[in-house]
Image (cartoon, rainbow, N blue to C red):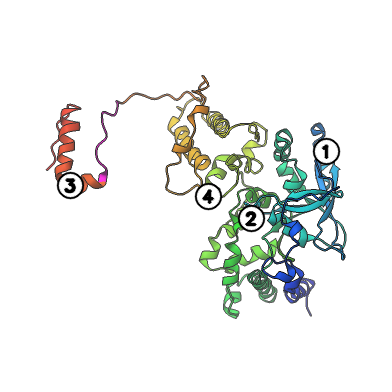
Amino acid sequence: METSGQLGRRRALETVRRPQSETPSTSNTDNALPQTLEQPFVSRGESKFSHFPLDLSQAPIRLIDLLPSRESNPYRVECNMIISTSISERTYEALSYEWGHSEASKKIFIDGMSFFVRDNLWNALYDLREESPRRLWIDAICIDQQNIHERNHQVRHMSAIYSSAHRVLVWLGQGTDQGVDALRTIASINLEFERYERSHPNSVRHSAQVPWEPIRHMCRNSYWTRLWIVQEIGLAQNLRIHWGRDHIEWDDFANCYQVLPNDLQRSVAFQLVRQRMARDGLNCFLKDLLETCKGSLCLDPRDKVCGLLGLADDCREGNLTADYSKSLFDVYEDVIRFQYENFLNGVSVTHEVDYCSIVSFSQQLQWILWHPLAGEDEDCTAQLDLRDSPSHRGGDLIRIVGFWGGSVASIGPECSNEMSSRKERDLWIKRDFHLGAGIDIRMN
């Protein structure tokens, strides 16, 4: 006899593959989207949606009810907007997705008025529709992105929004054949877990030939490179992964970790699985999060900090908050001051302050904020605009105690040239060291 869990997973495995005709595809001319949906065009007599201002003193949030598809026009995506004064009601699902680099050119309708979103979000809304209205929180729709004051307010409440959601939906994009194969593989592994004791995980690997390549394809999805998902996944109470119109539960995805090949265990996707499992009972500090997530991507470099504040336990008291009215250097300054004060508070009166740690953290933060893809071996400091620095404005950042050890008189040849040519090396030593600095250096 099958248990309820086995029956549910078997049904999920049987129904995970759907006819490709059910999802829009730009490569199939029969299913191509109408041209009017491809351009940011408002029809004559059609009203354009604009956000009604929120009363931020009451900490409200906007939510949308995603309406079912119309048989007469299935490509018309419609929703109604409501305002909730209580984040903790847990009556909504929050969407975690990749914004993408496309312009907001796909039309949807909010309260009957036109509103434009990016391609990936339009695809998510299209596929997430159900037979009854579905209540969602989506940042690009529920936050007035043009209102900096509101944007700051809502980002500061992002941790509460995601942790209070009934479920967080991970959206990996439009469905593909490889995506279906990946979800079927995960469902199969979990069925095996139901048949064999969990204390013998290797029996799953050896009992059948598991096709790992579809899961590798899944883990290479660009969604996993986004910085914001670290917070969205880390704070969620419940998670579900959607790929087109198919989905699996996050717990089934996470269960696969113990039987994965080493390369998949080290993937960014399963690093998030480990971080989520390890978070209970442990403190997360901003300094550590910045280092861990330095390779994650975002459109606005200020998000490298703002996107982690909701997870950082040392930021819970509001002593460091998101503020998009500030320049990138202002954000850098705020983080350095914050870390400096934390460091001073953790040093007893009997110990001297290790200023080298602050300088080292400052260098690390510069790499993270000013590097286009943090982690590459490039000089990011050249992109730092010192015209906006505190010294240029007449102030100072942090007073660091140090000592003067001399000055650079001249710069010699590159190391490769110096070591390859003894003549050039000796000439440099004689000219710059022996004569310039008054130091007699002899090399055999």
Of the two numbered discs 2 and 3 on the same chain, state the one appearing first in sequence: 2
Type of amino acid under label 3 = Ser
Disc 3 vs disc 4: which is toward the camera? 3
The amino acid beneath tag 2 is Met
Does the magenta-highlighted stretch encompass residue 113? no
Q: Which mark is residue 421?
A: 3
Report how far apart the C-alphas of labels 2 and 1 lie in the structure: 39 Å
The secondary element bearing badge 4 is classed as: loop
Q: Is residue 141 left or right of residue 229?
A: right
Give residue 52's mark. Answer: 1
| Residue 277 - label | 2
Closer to the chain start, of discs 3 and 1, is 1
- Viewport quadrant of the N terminus: bottom right
Residue at the extreme top of the image, as rendered: 394
Q: Position of residue 186 (x, y in %)?
A: 66, 70
Q: Alpha carbon of mark 4 to alpha carbon of mark 1: how far? A: 37 Å
Residues at marks 3 and 4, CA–CA distance in whole angstroms: 39 Å
Q: Amino acid at mark 1?
A: Phe
Q: Residues within 10 Å of mark 4 (few under 14, many from 20)?
A: some
Q: Position of residue 293 (x, y in %)?
A: 55, 48
* Residue 243 visible at all: yes
The nearer-to-camera label among 2 and 3 is 3
Residue 124 visible? The answer is no
Residue at 18% across / 41% down in the picture? 425
The front one of 251 and 13 is: 13
What secondary structure is marked by label 3?
loop
- Callout 2: few (<14), some (14-19), or many (20+) C-alpha neighbours within 10 Å? few
Q: Secondary structure at mark 2?
A: helix
Instruction: Identify residue type, mark 4.
Output: Gly
Residue 154: which disc? none
Residue at left offset 83%, top offset 41%? 86
